Image (cartoon, rainbow, N blue to C red):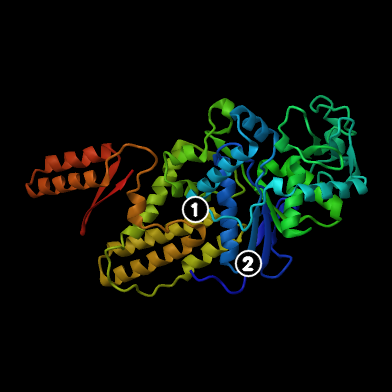
Amino acid sequence: MTQLTQPMPITIYDSMSGQKRPFMPLEAGRVGMYVCGMTVYDYCHIGHARVMVGFDVVVRWLRHIGYDVNYVRNITDIDDKIINRAKDNGESIYQLTDRFIKAMHEDADNLGCERPNSEPKATDFIPQMQHLIQTLESKNLAYQGATGDVYYAVENFAEYGKLSKRRLADMQAGASERVNVETDKKNPFDFVLWKAAKQTEPQETKWQSPWGVGRPGWHIECSAMSTCCLGDTFDIHGGGHDLQFPHHENEIAQSEGATGKTYANNWMHVGFINVDGEKMSKSLGNFFTIRDVMGQFHPETIRFFILSSHYRSPVNFSDSALKEAQTSLTRLYQALKSVESLTELAGEIDKTPFETPFNQAMCDDFNSAGAVSVLFSLAREINKAVNLETDEGNAQALALATLLKDLAQPLNILQLNPTDFLQAKVGETTGLSDSEIEVFIEARKQAKADKDFAKADQIRNDLKAQGVELEDGKNGTTWRRV
């Protein structure tokens, strides 16, 4: 599918306003987008996969419809969890974070995600964070407590709570039993901007500052990195739904408090992933890394599973849901495979009944689920045309298959050779090798030639029991893994 020369109109749901709005970038034809990235102390989990894939599709579609996108996703490489994990492992924080940054990139690459334009690391922006804190101090929005920590004064920012629709007074009223009121905070909801160093922490986690030796708080990191990379105001700020409060709320307070300008014009939040109907948690034993899942399912199946739901909707992750996604994606690849033996030139078809609803779905707040349904409509038409077994039908099927791949390209699915996907071995499973399967197919072919149909059926059943499905067609027998 050819990229459009003029950006197509698009609507995006904005979490701040709570409604879908026509997207109007600050600069015509250009988009600045910041997404909160990973804290790199462990392998990425399936919740991270949804954020990775969700915003990868946003970027791909915006570029496809004509926008020049500057996609920035940060890396949090200094944090309590990082310090504690490095200490437990007996390694430096940089050894730990470098290893898991590499692992994060491997996972994202396997999921078919393009790398962001830039991936700023928190430890590279310490001076900018300190400057931002000093600006907040000068505006009476920050103060240093008795223990040396520097806090943001939420009561002095009148609009605190506007993203999450929470009023500070209401939160304070219900906070007496739930919030630990630290003695050096003026308000229990004040949050840390700069943490005073502890003697037990390693030297590599300490920086000199106007408030003494210490390190930044989490929230100030994103305010500094986003504005340094994209400017005081940019087009889209994204992240997981769980970051809306307090992280994104605090980013707004810091950034708008310092600049007096709107921080981000559009806020996008990806929905939760539950596992078998429950929130994912290590304590519940339902915590899965991306690598765990790739040991059982093809990476494109995982991507397809994520795309089959709207990015804002909650998703229930389960083995059966992934198997269903695998079956569905297989149907699409089988439609593409069905035209491989057709040598006739593709015919002319009316693309409008498919292109129009596909584009409408994607331009309606990146409704990938609606777009995927159009792909299934196309696959059904391909199968109908192939089953006609006529030259006209074959020509139509080829043209429809080309359109199917073209439409799916901005979603980055259905771009593999169909046989490569259908016959792929996943993970470390010890199934039959390709050559072993071919030996069985030849034995079955001989059995049929000998009219030993019981033996032929037995070979088919034995292969199926070992995860191999045979498909007999006019061009011989093909196979796929199930």
From the viewer's perspective, is 376 left or right of 171? left
Q: Is residue 358 left or right of residue 427?
A: right
**Under tag 1, what secondary structure?**
loop
- Write down the quadrant of residue 10 in the picture: bottom right
Q: Residue 287 placed where, x, y %?
A: 54, 32
The residue at the point 64 percent across, 67 percent down is: 9
Q: Residue at x 64, y 29 (%)?
A: 87
Residues 467 and 223: in front is 223
Residue 314: x and y, percent?
A: 59, 42
Residue at 80% x, 28% y is 179
Left-right relation of 173 to 280: right
The kind of residue tagged 1 is Gly
Displayed quadrant of residue 72? bottom right
In the rendered image, the residue lying farthest to the left is: 450
Q: Residue 295: x, y in percent?
A: 43, 39
Q: Position of residue 118 (x, y in %)?
A: 64, 56
Categorize mark 2 by other alpha carbons within 10 Å: few (<14), some (14-19), many (20+). some
Q: What separation in Å lies between label 2 and label 1 (alpha carbons)?
A: 20 Å
Residue 188 at least partly seen: yes
Mark 1 neighbour class, 10 Å CA radius: few under 14, some 14 to 19, many 20 or more: some
Name the residue tied to disc 1: 112
User: Which numbered tag is attached to residue 68?
Assistant: 2
Element at badge 2? strand
Q: Residue at x 27, y 69 (%)?
A: 343
